Amino acid sequence: MIEVKGNMAKNDQVIELHEVWKTYRMGDQDVHALAGIDLEIKRGSFWAISGASGSGKSTMLNLLGCLDRPTSGSYALEGQRISSMSDDELSDLRLKHLGFVFQSFNLIPQLTVQENIELPLFYQGIDAHIAADRARTIANRVGLGDRLKHRPTELSGGQQQRVAIARALSNEPSVLLADEPTGNLDTATGDAIMGLLTELHNQGRTIIMVTHEPEIAAYAQFQLTMRDGKIASIIENHTCPSGIASLKNDAPC
């Protein structure tokens, strides 16, 4: 079991993977997308998962996001093991504990910024007035308080990604999962989005991000590299990017 030591409590794992395999049948061959993964992720940590194409990083993210199940082994999210859950139970678990940010934003163009942010709350059955208040609060938090009535096509790429992050935060998830969150953005806008994710991490949010860009992975507290479906290395980042103060006693940047 690869376990990162830090100042977080031993019993504060938000994610636990034990001997996880994900195998696909391709013709007459078994392809192991994940091969015996052992990993514990503490609450409040910030992880970047990297690796070459075919290394297993996307499969890992799908598994962590409860969009797929392991072929064998154990995955527990907030102490709940997913293998025996029904599809409806998995959907409820995702809605309650996970927020997703995608490279392509995945906003609904017909909806306003506020309505896009409120969407997960609608599916949770949250009262409309409470949902609206929460959406406004989160929009202000990500710097979009003056764009609530705009539609995605009226926003820049960076603003659209901020909406996507706000939507992911609306259900107050245990874990924020980001798949190449800067992939469609120019360098300056990507740096601004990473600054926002760093700020969320500093506030205690657990973030797991997939990226192929080393300079983006450098923002994370822990850099996990995958190779051939296995964890090749985990490096703890003691130097924060862009002049942010270094880690002290395993505290966030």
Image (cartoon, rainbow, N blue to C red):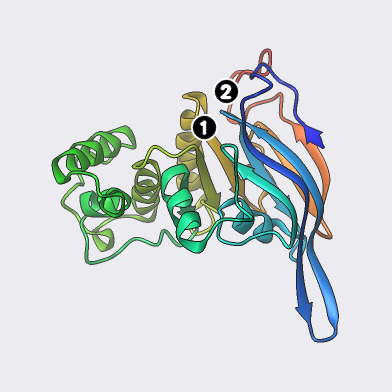
Mark 1, secondary structure of its residue: helix
**Front-most of 190 and 205?**
205
- Name the quadrant containing residue 223: top right
Disc with the residue nearer the chain's start (2 vs 1): 1
Residue, disc 1:
198
**Front-most of 247 and 17?**
17
Q: Is residue 138 left or right of residue 71?
A: left
Q: Is residue 49 visible?
A: yes
Mark whose residue sits in front, 2 or 1: 1
Whether the residues at callouts 2 and 1 have beta carbons within 8 Å, the answer is yes
Kind of residue sitting beneath label 1:
Thr
Q: Quadrant of the N terminus?
A: top right
Residue, disc 2:
244
Mark 2, secondary structure of its residue: loop
**Front-most of 251 and 31?**
31
Q: Is residue 100 visible?
A: no
Q: Tell which residue pokes out farthest to the bottom in this image.
A: 27
Q: Residue at x 74, y 65 (%)?
A: 53
Q: Residue at x 60, y 52 (%)?
A: 82
Q: Quadrant of the C terminus?
A: top right
